Image: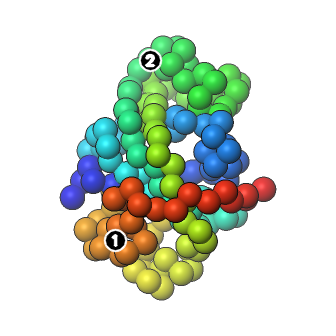
């Protein structure tokens, strides 16, 4: 069901900032329409890592003009002003996904294993989790908020 959980593709350097607690807002150029407060975001770390590492609970999703968004997220998004401006170049509004309750697998699930388990297709930016994907015990624990916290390093 849309809105229950979403897969977010996140670059390794930003996933690292989520892990170390310096990033508590995920930035997007497009707003996921069916995600609301309390939904679960499953974190897929893009190349070269290519692994599902865990999840976080969505607290708030805001869509604002770029300048207003920067005022809300600076110091929380894990990016410099230069990175922020480069990412949002060419658009007038941006999205901030504020999150908490970060949970991680003890061992990340690599893309190859995900494909073998369920014919998993990694998100380009984001995609909604299907009911069959959420039936997997590893995902169900994260969506329910019972995943294990573990410090991992990608760099």
Residue 65, image x, y percentages: 44, 17
The residue at the point 67 percent across, 57 percent down is 151
The residue at the point 59 percent across, 28 percent down is 76
Does residue 138 lie above or below 37 as drawn?
Answer: below
Seen from the viewer's position, the closer of residues 69 and 146 is: 146
Does residue 105 lie above or below 91 as drawn?
Answer: below
User: Left of 100 or right of it: where is 84?
Assistant: right
Q: CA distance from mark 1 to mark 2?
A: 34 Å
Residue 91, image x, y percentages: 48, 26
The N terminus appears in which quarter of the rendering? bottom left
Seen from the viewer's position, the closer of residues 67 and 139 is: 139
Secondary structure type for disc 2: strand
Q: Closer to the observer: label 1 or label 2?
A: 1
Residue 28, image x, y percentages: 48, 37
The circle drawn on residue 56 is none
**Dot 2 corresponds to which residue?**
65
The residue at the point 52 percent across, 62 percent down is 148
- Mark 1 touches mark 2? (CB < 8 Å): no
**Dot 1 corresponds to which residue?**
133
């Amino acid at each position: 069901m849309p809105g229950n959980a979403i897969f977010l593709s996140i670059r390794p350097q930003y996933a690292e900032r989520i892990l170390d607690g310096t990033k508590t807002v995920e930035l997007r150029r497009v707003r996921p329409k069916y995600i609301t407060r309390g939904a679960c975001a499953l974190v897929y770390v893009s190349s070269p890592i290519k692994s599902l590492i865990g999840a976080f609970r969505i607290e708030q999703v805001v869509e604002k003009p770029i300048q207003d968004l920067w005022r809300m997220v600076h110091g929380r998004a894990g990016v410099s002003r230069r990175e922020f401006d480069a990412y949002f170049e060419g658009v007038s509004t941006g999205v901030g996904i504020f999150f908490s309750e970060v949970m991680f697998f003890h061992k990340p699930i690599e893309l190859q294993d995900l494909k073998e388990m369920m014919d998993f297709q990694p998100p380009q930016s984001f995609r909604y989790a299907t009911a069959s994907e959420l039936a997997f015990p590893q995902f169900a624990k994260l969506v329910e908020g019972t995943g294990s916290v573990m410090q991992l390093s990608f760099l």
